[in-house]
Amino acid sequence: MIEYDIFKRRTISFEKAEKFGFVRVNGEYVYERTIYDGMMARITIDDSGVLSGDVYDEEFGEKYVNHRVESATGAFVVGVRNAYQALLEEIAVAISSVKRYVFDQANRIDAYIAEKYGVTPEFMWQQFPHFGVYRNRDTRKWFAIIMNIGRGKVLKGESGEVEVMNVKLDEQAGSFLGNGVYPSYHMNHKSWVTILLDDTVDDDRIAEMIEISFQNSFKKAKKK
């Protein structure tokens, strides 16, 4: 969904929304604007700060959906699609602030690492622009990485997106597995684990694993 893609890393301010022109109606904030040749966008924000939207034909009052069909390429539908996206992007800049990660827990853990270890993430890969690497400031070794991946990569058969953290627990890895902690995605299964950052695992439990990983980042590599 275009709304999710634009707003998933943003936090909406209701005060700014009202200044922009959103009006409180039946428990939601609502904004309407004609965007393209008789087509009106109706944008709503619920009390939890989730934004959604629809496009309507102003003359007939019927909902228009072709702009959401990727294969639709006619001049009219492309015009509506571009105008709707432009409106959403304008609203995003006007009423929201950027957050580093999608999930609230991922942002909490990021803030915790910054406060305790004085470390902020490095975003190293153009192909994966939201993969944040956390390094020990003294040794420059990684002790954590937060990634946004498909849920199915960790939880077979599930769909959607999730953020996870990989930490290096070495010989303690097996004792933490279960209840949101899995053999690591994309790293050594014997040393690293993957933690779901969707509040499945308690923050304190995650902090315990981060500390182990941080201490492990001081270890020297074993000679072969």
Image: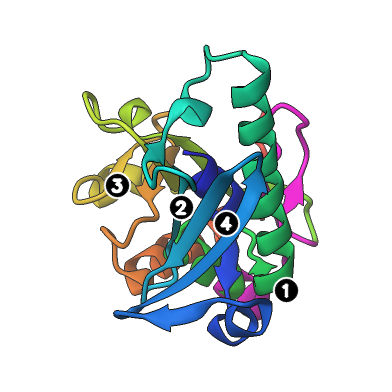
Question: In terms of secondary structure, where does tag 2 sit?
Answer: strand
Q: Is residue 125 magenta?
A: yes
Q: Residues within 10 Å of mark 4 (few under 14, many from 20)?
A: many
Residue at x 44%, y 64% (from the top left corner): 44
Question: What amino acid is at disc 3?
Answer: Val
Magenta residues (range)? 112-137
Mark 3 highlights which residue? 181
Residue type beneath disc 4:
Tyr
- In the rendered structure, which disc, 2 or 3, sits on the residue that comes first in sequence? 2
**Contact between labelled residues 2 and 1, with CB atoms less than 8 Å apart:** no
Mark 1 or mark 3: name the one nearer the start of the chain.
1
Residue at x 62%, y 34% (from the top left corner):
80
Disc 2 versus disc 3: nearer the observer: 2
Disc 1: CA contacts within 10 A as few (<14), some (14-19) or many (>=20): few
At 68% from the left and 30% from the top, the residue drawn is: 79
Side of 92 where 47 appears, left or right = left
Marks 2 and 3 sit apart, C-alpha to C-alpha, by: 36 Å
Classify 10 Å Cα crowding around label 3: few (below 14), some (14-19), many (20 and above).
many
Residues at marks 3 and 4 touching, judged by CB atoms closer than 8 Å: no
Between disc 1 and disc 2, whose residue precedes? 2
Task: Please tell me whether mark 3 sits on a helix, a strand or a loop.
Answer: strand
Q: Is residue 131 visible?
A: no
* Percent position of residue 195, x then y: 38, 49
Q: Nearer the viewer, mark 1 or mark 2?
A: 2
Marks 4 and 2: which is nearer the front? 2
User: What type is the residue that disc 2 sits on?
Assistant: Gly
Q: Which mark is residue 82?
A: none
State the residue position of label 4.
101
For label 1, the residue is: 118
Dot 4 falls on a residue whose secondary structure is loop
Instruction: Say what secondary structure mark 1 lies in.
Output: loop
Amino acid type at circle 1 is: Gly
